[in-house]
Image (cartoon, rainbow, N blue to C red):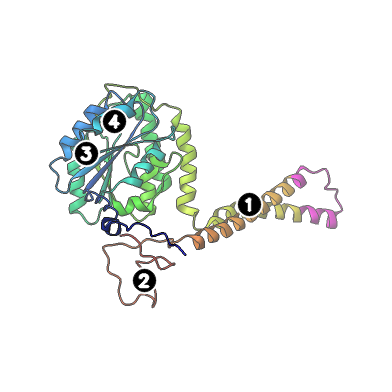
Amino acid sequence: MSYTVAPPRSLTAFLSVPAPAPRPAARPAVSVVVPIYNEVDNLADLVDQVHAALAARPGGFELICVDDASRDGSDRRLQELAATRPWLRPLRLARNYGQSTALQAGFDIARGRCIATLDGDLQNDPADLPALLDRLDTDPDIDMISGWRHQRQDGALSRRLPSRLANRLISWATDVQLHDYGCALKVYRREIIERIHLYGELHRFIPSLAREAGARIAEVPVHHRPRTRGQSKYGIDRTFRVLLDLLLIVFVLRYRQRPLHIFGGLGLAMGLPGGMMLLWLLGLKLVAGQPIGQRPMLMAAVMLLLMGLQFIVAGVISEMLMRVYHEGRPHAQYHLRTDVTPTSAQAPGRDPGRDPDGARRAA
């Protein structure tokens, strides 16, 4: 019987191991997220001004420019600028999703302990960033700082007047009192950004969402400059979208945990008058013997009662959906302050830093 002997493998084959993966760069102190849409003429100055404002800051920084499928070559310009600037991280979306999604994309890859946002049109002054970040670093009672364009350089009728009315309406509806919801210049602690998620056009309501996530908010006057290059992406038509989004945000902030209260309240407001009207008509029919079939009140009573029942049923279904939503989530529906040490009085077996499934939450 013959055997075939395989040639011996080299010693290096036995000892070879995969090359170690490159170590990621240290987490920067600040991540600046800027949504970009057709701002090719402003990009070079934007990048240079952010660098001038933050280059000397301890801990370093990164600038994340999220190109929302621009059509003017902004993506190519960002790539050119990033070739010689390792702190510049361009990101291009597959299509135009809108400012909220662009911001969320930047938040998802941001590594900084603090996160700042700017507009890409150079109307926000990056030189304001150091003062806002210093205030955030030195004041433990603040989790978010929102800029206030107290000397806004925009048209009075086309921009400032609608914005002023919208700011007052949003402040009244959400109970978060700010002079300027629309200012993109904001700074946040990282844990606040990790608690909120943007979609649709909710970027206008970030302060309200942050407050709902437990943030303590301050407002600081900042500089505002006139647009000198490019075209504005905002028009008077956005006023109507703000009103619709405001209805959504009020519902989310006030009734997300208890939808039956809003739907049930509407149901009772309609169903009870409808039921009383039907009882009144029934009394007229049985006691006084009056015909009620042709009375308009009968139709109104039936409609009110049916609409009230529909609202109540919608509220019950919403409550069931919310319970499925909360019980299926991998983490609790509340947030703890990281600057407060839990006491021994907490419930036994419950670690406030862990999710219900036992996974440790990131601080």
Q: Which residues are magenta?
A: 280-299
Q: Earlier in the sequence, mark 1 or mark 2?
A: 1
| Mark pair 1, 2: CA separation | 39 Å
Give the label on residue 311, or none.
Answer: 1
| Mark pair 4, 3: CA separation | 12 Å
Task: Find disc 2 in the rendering and name its residue.
Answer: 351
Kind of residue sitting beneath label 2: Asp
Task: Residue at 55%, 53% (x, y): give it.
Answer: 262
The quarter holding residue 49 reads top left
Name the secondary structure under disc 3.
loop
| Mark pair 2, 3: CA separation | 40 Å
Task: Residue at 66%, 51% (x, y): give it.
Answer: 310
Task: Find disc 3 in the rendering and name its residue.
Answer: 86
At label 2, counting other C-alpha atoms closer than 10 Å, the crowd grade (few under 14, some 14-19, many 20 or more) is few
Q: Earlier in the sequence, mark 2 or mark 4?
A: 4
Task: Find disc 4 in the rendering and name its residue.
Answer: 78
